[in-house]
Image (spheres, grey):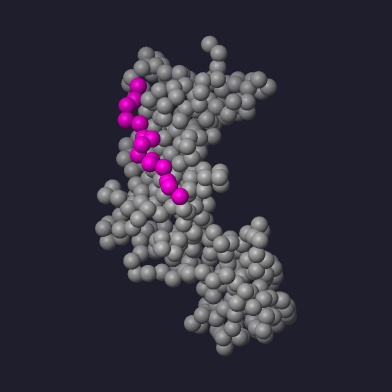
Amino acid sequence: MEFEVLRENLVKSLSVSNKAISAKSSLPVLQNVLIEADEGRLKLVTSDLEKSIVTWVGAKIKGEGSVTIPAKLLYNFVSSLKDERLKGTLKKDKLEISTDSTKAVFNGTEADSYPQFSYSISKNTLEIPSDVLKRAVEETYFSASTDDTRPEWTGILLESTKEGLLFVALDGFRMSKKVVKLSTKELPSFEKALIPAKNLLEVIRLAPSNFSIHLDLQPEKGNAVFALDDVFFVSKLLEGDFPDYNAVIPSDFSCTVVVKYDDFFNAIRASSVFSKNTGAVRLKINKQEKTITFISDDLELGSNEQTIKTVSISGEDIDLAFNLKYLLDYLNNVNSEEVELKISGVSSPSLITPKGRTDYTHIVVPVQPYWEE
């Protein structure tokens, strides 16, 4: 096989392909990229067995052939060149890359040694705008667990309901639920699918702006295939029972507060400076004064106390604490002019939502009081 390709295009595809290369893989061949001719284009395939990436590069190709080449080695070499065009010649398991002034030979392995997997896509796909998917993932992923001992909690649940397409993530201490409204034509019926949160993050990083992503959920194969222009991203689905997320959403509240987003965010960020010891922030809500006082302290560093005015407040006074990281995760990913905080008790789940939005729900469990009166 011989081919001629624009260096810029090959570098771009190799850069994408390398995102499915894992240094921890027990299979040496998975450090390689599979290169083969495919209907007048070069096809590049990489995988770490949890995710696989298939990319296509336009090229002038003579003959057929396939080989696996160390992916990062090839990328580092090709990206270092200045020539506009590259020529490739495959002879058995050796790939020669040449320009007018350079020639390199890469020792590869036969393509048959590379694991086979399915990446075909059916006609019954879910079509979702890239910016919509990006927002849904960004507003939920941070609630997914990072503890691999419960792998089903490390994913984001996708579920087709009457409300729309649901995205749900949780870790036992917090939960995020996002509803995406799509037309009936765009929302085919499917069973629940649990996709690793880290894979969905990779998808939204790769997805072009203003692009319609086609998602094919294939539970019988254990795959979710995302078609992103000249890139197919194949994610393994997680197995296991996802918790009943509706059961943790509180319905009775003892206090409801609305605050300006900027005031809330700045107070939490300032509190984080003095939370090394506890990792928490204390909130004292005063109905009469219409204020929230944020208190954080550290035996070594000192303490901080900051009071902000609320936009509105109802219910009773309450004194409770939250994990600072959990609040910052929410505030860093879900923007709004105002934040509504509904509290059901000092140890019961609280509801945090962007004021005026009905498509998003965030639940966070308070931490136990750590202060002495």
Q: Is residue 84 left or right of residue 117?
A: right
Answer yes or no: is residue 84 visible: no
Dominant secondary structure, magenta:
loop
Q: Residue at 37% x, 69% y: name it.
A: 122
Q: Residue 175: give x, y in percent of width and height.
A: 43, 39
For this orientation, the residue located farthest to the top is: 373
Which one is nearer the viewer's eye here, 41 or 258?
41
* Quarter of the view holding residue 102: bottom right
Q: Is residue 316 above or below residue 20?
A: above
* Residue 356 in sight from this viewpoint: yes
Q: Nearer the viewer, residue 312 or 362?
A: 362
Residue 164 against residue 114 in the figure, above or below: above
Quadrant housing residue 363: top left
Tell me where residue 182 appears, x and y as whole percent. 30, 55
Across the whole image, how many numbered discs are drawn on residues? 0
Q: Residue 62, image x and y in percent?
A: 57, 88
Residue 254 percent coordinates (x, y): 35, 22
Q: Residue at x 59, y 80 (%)?
A: 66
The relative height of residue 37 versus residue 116 in the rendered view (above or below) is below
Quadrant showing the N terminus: bottom right
Q: Residue furthest bottom?
A: 63
Decide whether residue 218 is among the magenta residues. no
Residue depicted at x 45% and y 41%: 170
The part of the image, by quadrant, that contains residue 345 is top left
Q: Is residue 244 covered in magenta?
A: yes
254 lies left or right of 8:
left
Which residue is at 42% across, 46% downward?
242
Q: Which residues are magenta?
A: 240-254
- The residue sitting at the front extreme is 240
